[in-house]
Amino acid sequence: NAGVTQTPKFQVLKTGQSMTLQCAQDMNHNSMYWYRQDPGMGLRLIYYSASEGTTDKGEVPNGYNVSRLNKREFSLRLESAAPSQTSVYFCASSGDRGQSGELFFGEGSRLTVL
Amino acid sequence: AQSVTQLGSHVSVSEGALVLLRCNYSSSVPPYLFWYVQYPNQGLQLLLKYTSAATLVKGINGFEAEFKKSETSFHLTKPSAHMSDAAEYFCAVSALRSGTYKYIFGTGTRLKVLA
């Protein structure tokens, strides 16, 4: 009964380093999303994937890349981390292409870029 | 374009008092509306959702929300606050963009419950 699993939960990077956040869901959902959460700004969509093999930009895609490896997995990569990318990142999934369906969230990955 | 506005980034109520968290939306088409709750160091979980079946929606933990089209509002209420309700609450609208529904979140309201 795992739902949406994100790794790692915590990470500290130096400016310019790269890393990948991993996300997997076991609910057979089509749609997957990456959000970032910053104080006072709510959740902002970075990238989403409506189905396996497709990805699209959200509100704040700059500095990020994604891969929808298969139906279960959707990874977020920071190629050259910047302090502005210090944030809490959430992966989410939805079962019916996002149409009125509930979003299921992971527990978050807290990233600090020094 | 769709948008969501949550009035009040912080709300404090006494234990046992009414909880009212405000959410207004704008949408050119009938929206799907949601309230999510986030407890410290956790992800968001669904409290309730409106999908046009009924204007008064009941959710978990005694919360409910009423969809008022004329006021473009979807306020969250609970008759009697409990200490365990202290959390951050997010209103969201499901919006159609480029052929795919995506979610737009409000900036959140942090609820504090006073003993």
Image (cartoon, helix red, strand yellow):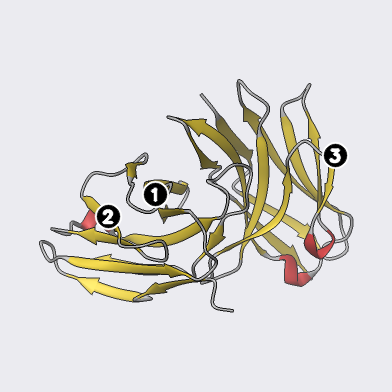
Q: Amino acid at mark 1?
A: Ser
Quick one: label 2 or label 1, which is nearer the N terminus?
1
Residue at numbered disc 2? A66
Q: Marks 1 and 2: in contact by CB < 8 Å?
A: yes
Residue B110 x %, y %: 62, 56
Local crowd at mark 3 within 10 Å, few (<14), some, or many (≥20)?
few
Residue A1 visible in the snapshot: yes
Residue at numbered disc 3? B54
Task: Find residue B25 and report its image quarter.
Answer: top right
User: What is the secondary structure assignment of the residue under circle 1?
Assistant: strand
Q: Amino acid at mark 3?
A: Ala
Q: Amino acid at mark 2?
A: Val
Tell me what residue is drawn at x 21 percent, y 59 percent.
A78
* Count of number-bearing discs: 3
Q: Marks 2 and 3: in contact by CB < 8 Å?
A: no
> In the rendered view, would you say A86 is above or below B94?
below
User: What is the secondary structure assignment of the residue under circle 2?
Assistant: strand
> In the rendered view, would you say B100 is above or below A106?
above
